[in-house]
Image (spheres, helix red, strand yellow):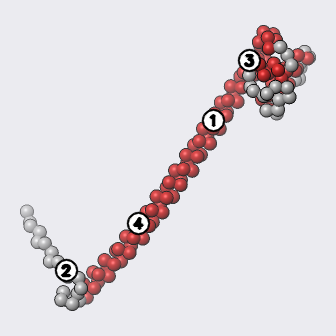
Amino acid sequence: MSVLSLAGETDPVRRDIIAAINRLLAGTPRRSRGRLNISQLAVEANVKRWRLTHQHTDLKDRFQAEIAHAETQQAAIIRSADDYEDLKRKHAELNRHCRDLERRLEIYAVALNQLALQNAGLADRDADAAKVRALPRRRQLNP
């Protein structure tokens, strides 16, 4: 992947700088440590730093613009990855919450079933034969 084209460049120094820019941005340095800064670009292109900062300022500016663009893209990727991890964490929390609700629902279903059986037992028997005694209902006062 080349960011800058060598087509139309006849100056060998400019061609070396453009090739160095393309290698650094691709992550395949040959002479430098691969850091994305002007000093490393000068080392990669095998030129003096002042030649970049004083004679070939257009290439220096283009390189810095490409670095800024790459950093913006990297920051967006990191944000996206962080958002994905947050969603995974929230999904796991919701799954745990749903499992807890399902367990409670099972407990409530058993309790309701027991209450329904007791109610049916009270309805079918007389009050003396039932193990559970029904309490008399309160009278409601009419206002």
Figure check: 102 above or below 115: above
Disc 4 or 2, which lies upstream in sequence?
A: 4
Q: Which residue is mark 4?
A: 104
Figure check: 83 above or below 33: below
Figure check: 68 above or below 139: above
Disc 2 or 3, which lies upstream in sequence?
A: 3
Instruction: Inspect the image, locate mark 4, and give the three-letter code of the amino acid beneath it.
Output: Arg
The residue sitting at the front extreme is: 33
In the picture, the disc for residue 76 is 1
Instruction: Inspect the image, locate mark 1, and give the three-letter code of the amino acid beneath it.
Output: Ala
Whole-number angstrom distance, CA of label 4 to CA of label 2: 28 Å
Instruction: Inspect the image, locate mark 2, and give the three-letter code of the amino acid beneath it.
Output: Ala
Q: Which residue is mark 3?
A: 61
> SS at mark 3?
helix
Q: Is 141 left or right of 107, judged from the image as shown?
A: left
Q: Nearer the viewer, mark 2 or mark 3?
A: 2
Task: Answer whether labels 4 and 2 touch (C-beta < 8 Å).
Answer: no
Disc 2 or 1, which lies upstream in sequence?
A: 1
Q: Which residue is mark 2?
A: 134
Residue drawn at the location 60% of the way across and 38% of the way down: 79
> SS at mark 2?
loop
Task: Answer whether labels 2 and 3 touch (C-beta < 8 Å).
Answer: no
